Image: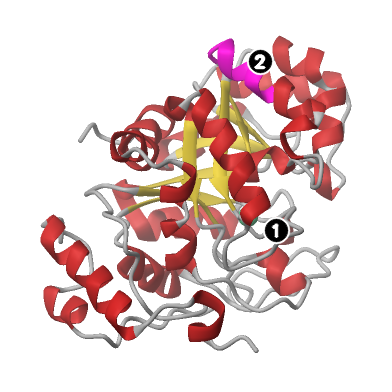
């Protein structure tokens, strides 16, 4: 039922054509070798369906702005963790980068580690200057710890409201102000009703605000849900960002086309391509929890071109916008 060919309709010819397009783009630094790309074998990546390369042109210094690293052998999960995600370390992630042609990445602290960012920070150490991270902190953290994290490449904090993090306005405002001193942004993992409810607080926060997975706008409401307008209002004010990531989240249409979540992504991108980011959400923890079949990461990167048909706008989303938000060197 889930054979690659049937789910995605890729013929061998499409595969070869896609691989050829990437070779011709000439951006081979950090990517699969030309030899790899000429072969129709592709690259198998853990927790990802298919092996083929994206068919869209992936520019040099393209960034995956949302993925996670899980290393339960060296860094055990917190006792509250119920997911027990299998190991998904830096080496496995490197395979995904190679397959997708990405060279920069943003590691997002997953809920399995609670407030203990050791695994995420270790991955930052391993990955060097092309990596940044978003951590999850509690109010007891010291300024010197924040400063050390900043030196390593942390550029934001995440409030996992969907996983029971405090919605207390004072707690959020206090932490937001503390990390604003480092120029960090706030990333929200929360459902759309919470976003709509928290509108006035969101406007009070001094930071740039990043919404995961298209703000988790639910279906079938889609862009008619009030949160869509709330996020657009924040974008207009110059402080809202949206991750066009995890198309399999909040979809009722499902893959391989994710017609409903693609439509929401397209609507956001039409408002402000300069405020959009793209992320793989690898290793797809929600898919693992729900025991759904692994998504095809190359296919999902290709769907960026459906949401954002203009190549210049896609360049912003993959290269320029991440440079601005996460402070990568300018290309
Ligand atoms: Zn995620």
Q: Is 127 placed above or below 227 here?
A: below
Q: Residue at x 66, y 15 (%)?
A: 233
Q: Nearer the viewer, residue 81 or 94?
A: 94
Q: Position of residue 320 (x, y in %)?
A: 32, 32
Q: Secondary structure at mark 1?
A: helix
Q: Is residue 123 left or right of residue 324?
A: right
Which quarter of the rendering shows the N terminus? bottom right
Q: Secondary structure at mark 2?
A: helix
How many other residues sit within 10 Å of disc 2, few (<14), some (14-19) or many (≥20)? some
Q: Residue at x 15, y 56 (%)?
A: 25
Residue ID for mark 1 = 113
Dominant secondary structure of the residues highlighted in magenta in the image: helix
State how the image is colored.
Answer: secondary structure
Q: Residue at x 77, y 71 (%)?
A: 289
Which residues fall within the magenta stretch? 231-238
Q: Position of residue 243 (x, y in %)?
A: 56, 41
Q: Position of residue 18 (x, y in %)?
A: 27, 69
Q: Nearer the viewer, mark 2 or mark 1?
A: 2
Q: Position of residue 244 (x, y in %)?
A: 54, 44
Which quarter of the rendering shows the C terminus? top left
Tell me if residue 177 can be seen.
Answer: yes
Residue ID for mark 2 = 233
Q: Nearer the viewer, residue 309 or 163?
A: 309
How many other residues sit within 10 Å of disc 1, few (<14), some (14-19) or many (≥20)? many
- The answer to whether residue 236 is magenta is yes
Mark 1 or mark 2, which is nearer the start of the sequence? 1
Determine if the C-beta at disc 1 is less than 8 A from ligand 1.
no
Q: Is residue 211 left or right of residue 80?
A: left
């Amino acid at each position: 039922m889930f054979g690659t060919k049937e789910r995605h309709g890729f013929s061998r010819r499409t595969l070869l054509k896609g691989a050829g397009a990437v070779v011709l783009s000439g951006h081979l630094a950090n990517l699969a070798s030309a030899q790899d790309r000429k072969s129709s074998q592709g690259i198998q990546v853990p927790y990802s369906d298919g092996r083929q390369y994206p068919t869209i042109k992936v520019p040099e210094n393209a960034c995956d702005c949302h993925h996670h690293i899980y290393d339960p052998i060296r860094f055990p999960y917190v006792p509250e963790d119920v997911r027990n995600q299998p190991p998904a370390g830096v080496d496995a992630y490197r395979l995904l980068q190679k397959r997708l042609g990405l060279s920069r990445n943003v590691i997002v602290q997953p809920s399995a580690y609670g407030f203990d960012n050791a695994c995420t920070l270790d991955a930052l150490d391993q990955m060097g200057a092309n990596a940044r991270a978003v951590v999850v902190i509690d109010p007891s953290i010291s300024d010197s710890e924040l400063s050390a994290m900043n030196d390593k490449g942390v550029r934001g904090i995440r409030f996992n409201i969907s996983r029971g993090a405090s919605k207390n306005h004072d707690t959020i405002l206090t932490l937001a102000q503390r990390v604003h001193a480092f120029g960090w942004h706030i990333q929200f993992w929360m459902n759309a009703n919470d976003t709509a409810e928290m509108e006035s607080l969101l406007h009070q926060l001094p930071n740039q605000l990043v919404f995961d997975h298209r703000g988790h706008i639910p279906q079938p409401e889609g862009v008619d849900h009030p949160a869509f307008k709330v996020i657009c209002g924040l974008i207009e004010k110059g402080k809202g960002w949206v991750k066009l990531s995890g198309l399999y989240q909040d979809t009722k249409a499902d893959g391989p086309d994710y017609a409903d979540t693609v439509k929401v992504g397209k609507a956001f991108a039409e408002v402000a391509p300069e405020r959009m980011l793209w992320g793989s959400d690898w290793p797809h923890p929600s898919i693992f929890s729900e025991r759904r079949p692994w998504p095809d990461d190359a296919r999902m990167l290709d769907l960026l071109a459906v949401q954002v048909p203009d190549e210049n706008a896609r360049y912003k989303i993959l290269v320029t916008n991440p440079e601005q938000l996460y402070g990568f060197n300018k290309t």
